[in-house]
Amino acid sequence: MKQITVLLADDHTILREGLRALLELEGDFEVVGEAANGLQAVELARELHPAVVVLDLAMPQLNGLEAARRILQQVAPPPKVLILSAHADDAYVEQVAALGVMGYLVKQTSAHLLAKAIREIYNGKVFYSPSIAKRLGDHQQETPRRAGRIRKDAVHLTSREREVLQRVAEGGANKEVAADLGISVKTVEKHRQSVMQKLGIHDTAGLTRYAISAGIIESSVQCTIL
């Protein structure tokens, strides 16, 4: 039986260990690596060339959306990417789908469904949690006017703006963010102001609340300022 190589990326060690154990029981999966943050996920994907990468969305240093973007752009041949997240907001599902992500599961899913999803996307098929698939199907039935309004209302942030937003929401000062990203403090300030303008948010607490609601960071991060 051919083994499907898998890279697991989630900042919770116990979850990664549990997923590894569940997948290895299936017999046709080989977990070749584990990443605790988005940057590590990108690095390991480049190094290990797994067939499938299972990514959480809310990870430190680099969130799953940006990690997926880099993996699909920088790893050749690109692996199949499956999002496994507690967040199932339609806007995020649409964004990751636009990147070329093949699957999206909520974390409440069963081990059987996770294994099925990995096999399906490995074979080139798209796979979503049933609840997400139903909502997407419902949206396809909406009027063009309603669908157009959804697209118009979506806020587009650049990859760098999302990186800055995440670092700021995690509590980083401009100088720290600049050092982490290898850019100037002035550039950080420029991106920060652009994000605030696009989102209509005027303080760091508001940015943090947005990042939590959008699944960019977890609610435990910086909860003291909320």
Image (spheres, helix red, strand yellow):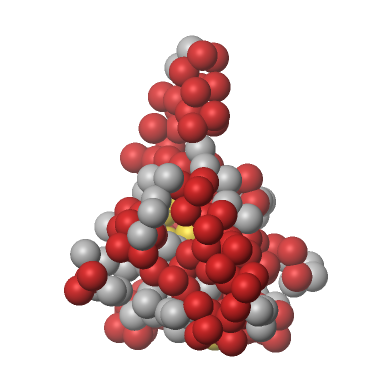
Considering every residue shown, the one lying at the far front of the view is: 186
Check the picture and name the quadrant holding the N terminus. Answer: bottom right
The image quadrant of residue 183 is bottom right
Nearest the viewer among 48 and 218 is 218
Which residue is rendered at x = 52% and y = 84% of the image?
175
Q: Nearest the camera: 82 or 63?
A: 63
Residue 73 image offset from top left, x and y in percent: 74, 64
The residue at 30%/83% (across/down) is 14
- Identify which residue is drawn at 26% across, 66% down: 219
Q: Within the image, what quadrant is residue 112 found in?
A: bottom left
Res. 23 in view: no
Q: Is residue 136 visible?
A: yes
In the depicted structure, whether residue 189 falls above or below residue 171: above
Q: Where does the image place residue 145, in percent across and percent down from the top left?
A: 51, 14
Q: Is residue 147 above or below residue 198?
A: above
Question: Disc count in the image?
Answer: 0
Viewer-nearest residue: 176 or 19: 176
